[in-house]
Amino acid sequence: MDTCKEMLDALTDYLEGDLPEDDEEEFEGHMEDCIPCDAFFRTYRKSSEMARETLRVEDVPPELQARVRRYLRARLGLER
């Protein structure tokens, strides 16, 4: 991982603990050295935490739930 884009592409894997140890160390080093990436990462992480704390599945309109599921199935190649 050499660029900011590659770091941001790895963000979800990092948060979920799915990065290989070497990549995790590189990710953390990049965040220490790159102020814009670190700011984005902190905002992303905080937003995710706040959403988990305040948003319940029941609060999301059924139409939006269905659209998100369709998008994820298509993105992951799981279309039925």
Image: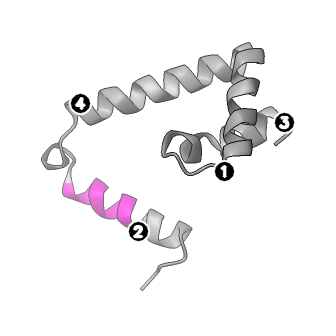
| Mark before the other along the chain sequence, 3 or 4 | 3
Q: Mark 2 or mark 4: name the one nearer the start of the chain.
A: 4
| Image coordinates for residue 38, horizontal then vertical, percent | 65, 20
What element does badge 4 sit on? helix
Image quadrant where one finds the N terminus: top right
Quarter of image, res 11: top right
- The segment highlighted magenta reads 62-70
Q: Which residue is mark 1?
A: 20
Single out the mark in the foreground, 3 or 2: 3
Residue 12 part of the magenta-drawn span = no
Please state which amino acid type lies under the numbered disc 4.
Glu
Q: Nearer the viewer, mark 1 or mark 4?
A: 1
**Mark 3: which amino acid?**
Thr
Disc 1 residue type (three-letter): Pro
Q: Secondary structure at mark 1?
A: loop
Element on which disc 2 rests: helix
Q: Earlier in the sequence, mark 3 or mark 2?
A: 3
Disc ID at residue 3:
3
Q: Which residue is mark 4?
A: 53
Toward the top, the furthest residue is 35
In the image, 77 versus 61, the foreground residue is 77
Mark 1 and mark 2 lie on one chain; the one further toward the N terminus is 1
Percent coordinates x, y for residue 46 in the rendering: 42, 23
Residue 73 in the image: state x and y as whole percent: 45, 71
**Going by the image, does 33 lie left or right of 61?**
right
Tell which circle, 3 or 1, labels the residue nearer the N-terminal end. Answer: 3
Spot occupied by residue 49 in the image (x, y as percentages of width and height): 35, 29
Horizontal side of 18 relative to 50 (left or right) equals right
Q: Which residue is mark 2?
A: 70
The chosen color scheme is one colour
* Residue sticking out furthest to the bottom: 80
Measured Cα–Cα span from mark 1 to mark 2 = 30 Å
